Amino acid sequence: MINKNTIKKDFPIFKANPKLVYLDSAATTQKPQAVIDALVKHYENTNANIHRGIYEMSEQATKHYEEARAKIARFIGAQGARNIIFTRNTTEAVNLVAQSFARHHLKAGDEILLTVMEHHSNIVPWYLVAKEKKLKLRFVRITSDGTLDPKDLVAKATKKVKLAAFTHVSNVLGTVNPARDLVSFFHARGIPALIDGAQAVPHMSVDVSAMDCDFYAFSGHKMLAPTGIGVLYMKDKYLGSLPPFLGGGEMIRSVSETNVVFADAPAKFEAGTPAIEAAIALGAAVDYLEHIGMKNIERHEKELAQYTLEKLRQVPGVTVYGPTDMKRRSGAVAFNLKGIHPHDIASLLDEQNIAVRAGNHCAMPLHKFLGVPATCRISPYIYNTKKDIGVLYDALGDINKTMFGS
Ligand code: PLP
């Protein structure tokens, strides 16, 4: 359960700045004391490098790091800890698949199918590999309600498509894509599927086994954990066959002057010293989220999104983007106010201690498609309440008054 009256107390940032209305959690979330404590505890008690120390403290650090991996595997319904590869973030996870899978398995003329609502981190890694290997990127369009256009999807999922990569939840429109159905649709055509789960895992229960996706990527810092830790889930069938993305220590079994034998996955994909403390703290974040319950989180955010939409619709000159059907959307809401640049809205809101994001949110193709250069985005999380949305609503009213006297 979320205790709306006390949850903010778990987050020290709100003690430091009690007036803060933080509505930019899609960019990064605030951190609860439990996560900060896990980080500090590691440094204070078990700080050592992992996997190679023969001494007690290193073994402890290794144990905590591997326990975090197993916890994350359970949290997203992976077949086992072996399927969880620690990366720096979603971006690195997608790059890993682009370089290890697409670069080695796709050939000139093959297509990668994306959608127009992708974050740049699910476009640019494919662009880089496409340029090198002469692949083609195609983008599924969206309809006026901000959901994928089924006709365009069918038309573009041709035999030439050798990989589909799509976001589970849009970071701008809040659209929740039907991930499970999309994966079956692609698999029925022999197309493997990568899902960008950066905006899904923090907000809803995700079960990668039920979804049957081939790859699933997400970032720790968007789900209460520190920056510098992310996850790539990889299905068993790729663990042995894909080559590593980066080379170095930790990912090898043996090295000679003429040959290298790689370690088994997931170590094969984790070259060099990882963000040990951040992985352990991600484990603590998972504990915290599970304690509240992902269903409760989802319900809370839907309620907030519904309330946000209701309040925004009362603001003169507002345009709201994304689905109106609450079943198809999560908490993030993008909007514009007529005659005011989104950057001006964000800085005027900042004067009232309200943090929102303005710009293209690393989704330039989507904004081009919407026909606007930028939007303002409200993205609430577990620590936000209707009161926060009320403060935002009043502030938007003030902005309209200041600018237009109405
Ligand atoms: N995908 C989506 C949908 C996102 O919202 C973001 C970040 O906002 C990313 C990917 C990239 O995440 P990161 O910068 O943590 O790699």
Image: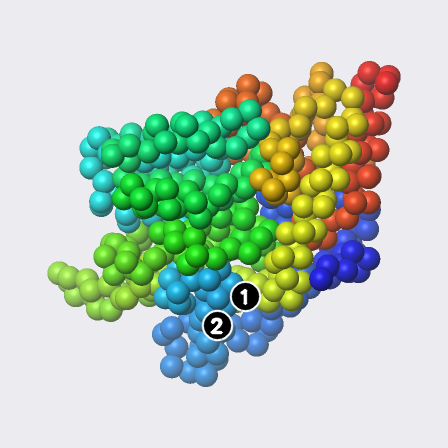
Question: Which class describes the residues within 10 Å of circle 1: few (<14), some (14-19), or many (20+)?
Answer: many
Q: Which residue is outermost to the left?
A: 258
* Residue 2 versus residue 343 in the image, above or below: below
**Residue at position x 39%, y 31% in the image:** 153
Q: Quadrant of residue 323?
A: top right
- 66 or 307, which lies in front? 307
Q: Which quarter of the figure is the C terminus placed in?
A: top right
Total marks shown come to 2
Q: Residue at the bottom extreme?
A: 56
Against 364, residue 37 (above or below) is below
Picture layout, residue 204 above or below residue 55: above
For the residue labelled by badge 2, is the local secondary structure a helix, a strand or a loop? helix
Q: Residue 301: image x %, image y %?
A: 68, 48
Q: Are marks 1 and 2 in contact (CB under 8 Å)?
A: yes
The residue carrying mark 1 is 283
Q: Is residue 276 visible?
A: no
Badge 2 density bin: few <14, some 14–19, many ≥20, Cα 10 Å: some
Residue 192 drawn at (x, y percent): 32, 46
Amino acid type, label 1: Gly
- Residue 300 in the image, given as x and y percentages of width and height: 70, 51
Mark 1 or mark 2: which comes first in sequence?
2
> Residue at (49%, 48%) from the top-left corner?
197
**Residue 243 versus residue 185: which sits nearer the camera?**
185
Say which residue appears at 70% left-offset and 31% top-offset: 346
Q: Secondary structure at mark 1?
A: helix
User: What percent of the width, then of the height, locates residue 195?
Assistant: 43, 46
Q: Examine the image and state in which quarter residue 23 appears.
A: top right
Taking the image as drawn, is residue 19 in sight? Answer: yes
Label 1 C-beta lies within 8 Å of the nearest ligand 1 atom: no
Q: CA distance from mark 1 to mark 2?
A: 8 Å
Residue assigned mark 2? 67
